[in-house]
Amino acid sequence: MSQDLIPGELIESKIYVFRGKNVMVDRDLARLYGVETRVLNQSVKRNIDRFPDDFMFQLTKEERQNWVSQIVIPNSEKMGIRIPPLVFTEQGVAMLSSVLNSDRAVQVNIQIMRTFTRMREMLTENEELRRKIELLEKQYDEKFVMVFDAIRRLIDEPSKNEKEIGFKY
């Protein structure tokens, strides 16, 4: 097992959700691969047929503004993000290793793929846990309804056998 080049937490922090898909932004990928963003984008444009819309898309201006407002980057760097960036789905990231011919790109891609897989597994586990909790809540809700109904009947219906206490005038 080789030593990871990049901590998994760093990769996870660079995965965003746009249009309902987990994606990574071109500038973050370029940094992870150790290349300039323009070099990454040039490689993609030279091989554009490998990147259909479900592998890569460009953010709209509104999506870009939303993304920039949510991440903490210096104003000087924000000025460099005038063009909405390209974002890559998991499949697009996998395709990047074939257009970026470097050992680092292959190793970084392996780590990114493992991170995407780990995140999917966590979501699946959380979904199973959510279903189990809902089932337990439903079972206990039914039991507690019976208990609360019994308590309500006791409170609402005064006992006929009770003797009144106190003085009568």
Image: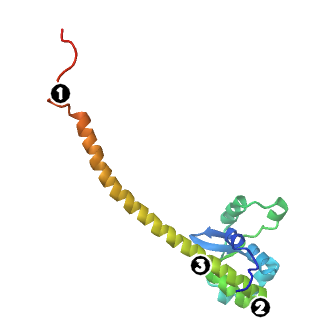
Q: Residues within 10 Å of mark 2 (few under 14, many from 20)?
A: few
Residue drawn at x 59%, y 78% as measured from the top left? 117
- Find residue 42 and report its horizontal and vertical position in percent: 78, 84
Of marks 3 and 2, which one's residue comes earlier in the chain?
Answer: 2
Can you identify the residue that label 2 sits on?
A: 101
Circle 1 — which element?
Answer: loop
- Find residue 168 and report its horizontal and vertical position in percent: 18, 11
Circle 3 — which element?
Answer: helix
Q: For residue 100, what is the image quadrant?
A: bottom right
Q: Residues within 10 Å of mark 1 (few under 14, many from 20)?
A: few
Circle 2 — which element?
Answer: loop
**Residue toward you, 150 or 99:** 150
Mark 1 residue type: Glu
Q: Are marks 2 and 1 in contact (CB under 8 Å)?
A: no
Query: In front of the other: label 2 or label 1?
Result: 1
Query: In front of the other: label 1 or label 3?
Result: 1
Q: How far apart are marks 2 and 1 (CA)?
A: 90 Å
Q: For residue 150, what is the image quadrant?
A: top left
Mark 3 residue type: Thr
Mark 2 residue type: Asn
Q: Are marks 3 and 2 in contact (CB under 8 Å)?
A: no
Can you identify the residue that label 3 sits on?
A: 117
Q: Distance between the residues labelled 1 and 3?
A: 68 Å
Disc sitting over residue 162 in the figure: 1
* Residue at the farthest right position: 76
